[in-house]
Amino acid sequence: MLGRVIRIARPSCLVVPKANHQNYVTSEILAKIEKECDRYCLVPRVPPHKVTVIGAGSDVGRMACLFLKQQKIIKVLSLFDEEPEHNVLGVAADLAHIDTSTTVEAYQGRIYLQEALCDSDVVLICGGHYVMPPCCCLLDRDLFFQNMQHVRTAAIACAQFCPQAVIAIQTPPVDCNFALCIDTLKLANVYDKRKVLGVNAINSMRANQLFCSFTGTDPSTATTPVVGGTGRCTRVPVFSVAKAGNFPQTQVECLTRLVREADDIICRVKSNNEQGHLSIGFSTARFVLNIMKGLFERPTFIDSALVEQDQPGKCYNMPICATPVTVGKHGIEEYAIPTLNETEKRLLEDAKCDLEDMINLGSCYAMGNEYCLHPCKICPCRYYPPCPVTQPCKIPPWLNGTLLRNGPGSLKVGFMRFKHLFDSAALLHRFSIQDSRVTYQCRFLRSNTYNRNRAAQRIVVTEFGTQAVPDPCHTIFDRVAALFKPGDSISDNAMISLYPFGDQVYAFTEAPVIHRIDTVTLDTLERKDLMECVALVNHTSHPHVMSNGDVYNVGMSIIKGSLRHVVVKFPFTEKGDMFKEAHIVGSMKTRWMMHPAYMHTFGITENYFVIVEQPLSVSLYRTFRNQLSNQPLASSLKWFPQHKTHVVLISRHTGKEVNRYQTDTLFFLHIINCYERDRSLVVDLCTYKDAKVLDAMYIHAIESMQSNADYAEWFRARPKRLEISLDATPLTYIQPKLLVDLGCETPRIHYDLYNGRPYRYFYAISSDVDAEHPGLIIKVDTISGEAKTWWETDCYPSEPVFVPHPDAKEEDEGVVICALVFGTDECATGLLVLDAATLTELARACFTTPSPAPKCLHGWFLPSTLT
């Protein structure tokens, strides 16, 4: 018998006959005769009473095989596993020493899968990963993604090599993998709903044991079915069938909770943090044994199995549900639907949502469909009631409108966490100011990236600084094809800014996809791919909205086979789509052909578009490589510290490059303002000495800043001015001048009247994280160099937005409004209103949020007439 195990596990030697020898037994003539005989004289199949265990080398598989080896009804026990570390050959050799009549065969490796399955009567699919799932809606999804290929491979092999076999699926999560298996069999046209069962034996066995222990009943004479699903949140033990109707309700609830939390309890008790593999293995073996008895002896009752119901209307209106069944010689013969009491009906109704969601997940991956989260699991937008304004402050009565904000939201997806601040899901905020009262609401942007991550409950789209988990369904050819569709292949998580296009507002990032949002409900209304209208590969996060409503932005596009920086104009349309008439109005060659400069903003004056080509570039070679290898975009950036920064002027009239100048090596994110004056051009921007600030926004760097002596220097931004003579020769060096010795970021000006024109004041927040008061709001006088500040201990404002007074006569006549977060209370946010001239506080509205309120980045104020 031991020889039998080893012989089958190894490939047999091939005997090649002599060239002049023809074996009569395999001759073509005899083959034709045999084929005719098979055609007219069908010989009935003689079942070999064979059980094949796929995943036999796993902990559960070994336990199940141990019990199955002792059953006389099983004549051949075929063990298969493709994981070398499971050493199924050793398991079979060990089982072969047990003195029973069952023959043991072993097959190691996928190439032997056909031999293992051939002529099988029952196939048990077990094994895979067994992770403790604390919630069926959390880690079960991740568990499915780890095990789905194992189940899919087994299902395809069963369809090809033993379509007549009864299949029992035990690999967790059974709810998902059952749906995956049946849809795979449907695609192969071999599906028979009587012959596919999800193993729910462990749950019904636990329920029965708990009930019998409680009542002193012999477990062999009682049954306690479990209906619904197999997951922790979907299994519903029916104690009323076990005559527990006279139990106090508290005891029934306690037993139900014990059944649902049995995995957790065993895990906590066992020192190695494993599940109950012994009990799972025993119950699984008994489940398979009952199937074999039903096929070859007599109809056999099974306490609980996840099956496709014959009449869903009689099974709680659930097409797929775990119920007791009776198995006969052709598979399932009878569906026994237990009657539920009111408590059990309520539990089952609560479980339907989770079960349908998990079944849908498995089905979508089998059919190749896009998975959408079940509607009942999507949280609605929260609307916050009006909050009274802090007294004695008072919001100016003329200030009415909506402040929209955008920025990072949740850093977690399931059990995974984003690595960079720019990666977290975009969270939209809305502060509505009407009649001196303020309301607040927030909602996640429903981008494709957000939907896919949330559906999978893990990060499945690679972001700026975070690598997604690999998708086994995507081949290298899929990634190559994705290079030509950046709007579909890269993340569309638009979490940087918000800008109006006519009467519509869009959320921006630097990818070519933007999203239109509802300014009242914050619903995501439309996804716009700028590759389709102006062929932009990417663009800045900060377009310019002109006083006449036209919008300009800078991006990269391929023109006549050459990659160029281009300026795109979106002509104003009072109602409707401004993107239909979008066109390129200017372009320039990139400084380095394979390393175009990274741009977050650009400037505009009366006659010029101002492009600052900094020495931080996007390596095209690295971008292509990272796309193919699923690496984050951040690794595509390359810093050239030996090169100067170039300032390029593109004519607004001809669209051509007019001149370029150079200044110190620097990095910048935001241009404050640009304007022309007396044959000179002024460019004000917030500068860093290098691009380390991007590294400073990695979550690990933020959490460890106290132990990083260089962290404050990474964030050390200073506002500087470049005064350029328009008569200077090309590549003339321009000496930067310091405007104020304070860290300034997210600068804002009186935009409506002074964008692209001579101005005096700008507002910013502090970038000096080591300052005595890091939460500063700063007002800078660019003429005198003086600065005014506002601060409050433990208060951290976001980008200050200037709103002019309706009858303003001075540049700084109006208010500055900011969103606030607080260090001591992470579930609080607020709106601060300051006098723009003096930075004295006029009003504040504070709100308590149901979850932590993150600091936002950029936004836009819509007066009431435009909201």
Image (cartoon, helix red, strand yellow):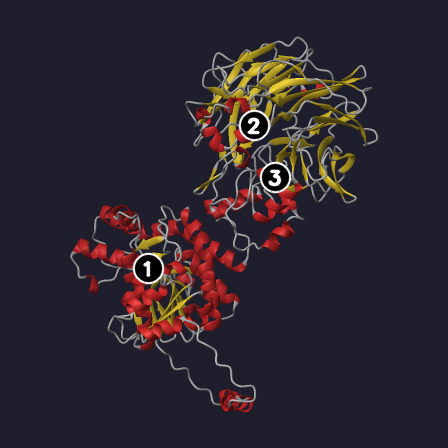
Q: What's the amino acid at mark 2?
A: Val
Q: Secondary structure at mark 3?
A: helix
Residue named by callout 2: 693
Q: Is residue 129 above or below residue 725?
A: below
Q: Secondary structure at mark 1?
A: helix
How packed mark 3 is, by other alpha carbons closer than 10 Å (few <14, some 14-19, many 20 or more), is many
Q: Where residue 529 sits in the image (x, y, percent)?
A: 67, 43
Q: Which mark is residue 60?
A: 1
Between the C-alphas of marks 1 and 2, the distance is 50 Å
Of the image marks 2 and 3, the number of the one nearer the N terminus? 3
Between the C-alphas of marks 1 and 3, the distance is 45 Å
How packed mark 1 is, by other alpha carbons closer than 10 Å (few <14, some 14-19, many 20 or more), is many
Residue named by callout 3: 636
Q: Where residue 617 sits in the image (x, y, percent)?
A: 65, 34
Of the image marks 1 and 2, the number of the one nearer the N terminus? 1
Q: Secondary structure at mark 2?
A: helix
User: Residue at image x 42%, y 65%?
Assistant: 311
Q: What's the amino acid at mark 1?
A: Val
- Front: mark 1 or 3: 3
Q: Is residue 186 above or below residue 593?
A: below
Q: Quadrant of the C terminus?
A: top right
Instruction: Please state which of residues 803 and 503 is positioned toward the viewer in this rendering.
Output: 803
Q: What's the amino acid at mark 3?
A: Ser
Q: Quadrant of residue 54?
A: bottom left
Q: Where residue 632 sits in the image (x, y, percent)?
A: 56, 41
Q: Is residue 494 above or below residue 164?
A: above
